[in-house]
Amino acid sequence: MRGDDFKIRGQDTPPARLKDIRKGLLALHTLELMASTIYKFQISSSKEELNRQLIAAMCNEMVHYQDFQVKLFEYGWKPSKLRWLYWLVGFAFGFISRFLGTKAILRTGIWVESKAVSHYDALLHNVNWDEDTRKVIEKDQADEQGHIARWRNLYQSIQ
């Protein structure tokens, strides 16, 4: 990344629009923290293909988390002080699903990513995003759809 990749955003933007953008970015940021934490606690020390896929998914979610953190700071905002609660939820989903086995890990991934895609859809339709931020959200949503396809394929292969 280069310095030109970052902008100060929000000048001359109506307060009501900024409020919606802030609320949306905070939601996306905390939900991506939860998603990366789920994957982090699903990964075991096993040398299985599933672990490689979970590592890749965790990394991808961490990029999304970073995308939204950057956008928050570009607008002059900070991440939620309550984001640790999403970390706890991610830990619980990740740890419990890992304990329950491969099918539970994959079902959890499908469910969480499906919820994420729905959340992205709602935010894309209900918030008047700036063009750069909209592109990031659309890219990240496409990644989530890819995760759903990956987890479904793996789930069907073990049926």
Image: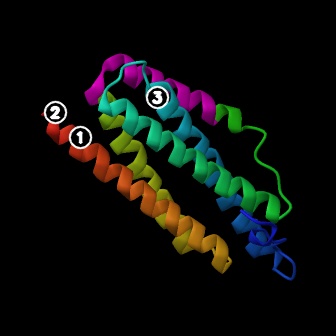
Residue position for label 1: 154
Mark 1 or mark 3, earlier in chain: 3
Q: Within the magenta stretch, is there residue 78?
A: no
Q: How is the image coloured?
A: rainbow
Quadrant, the C terminus: top left
Residue 70 in the image: above or below residue 111:
below
Q: Nearer the viewer, residue 141 or 154?
A: 154
Task: Write the start and end of the magenta stretch as one range.
Answer: 86-103
Mark 3 or mark 2, earlier in chain: 3
Dot 2 crowding, Cα within 10 Å, few <14, some 14–19, many 20+ = few
**Where residue 61 appears, x then y in whole percent?**
54, 46
**In terms of secondary structure, what is the magenta stretch mainly?**
helix
Marks 3 and 2, how far apart in space?
21 Å
Residue 126 in the image: above or below residue 83:
below
At label 1, which amino acid type do we have? Answer: Leu
Residue at horizontal 76%, vertical 58%?
72
Marks 2 and 1, how far apart in space?
7 Å
Residue position for label 2: 158
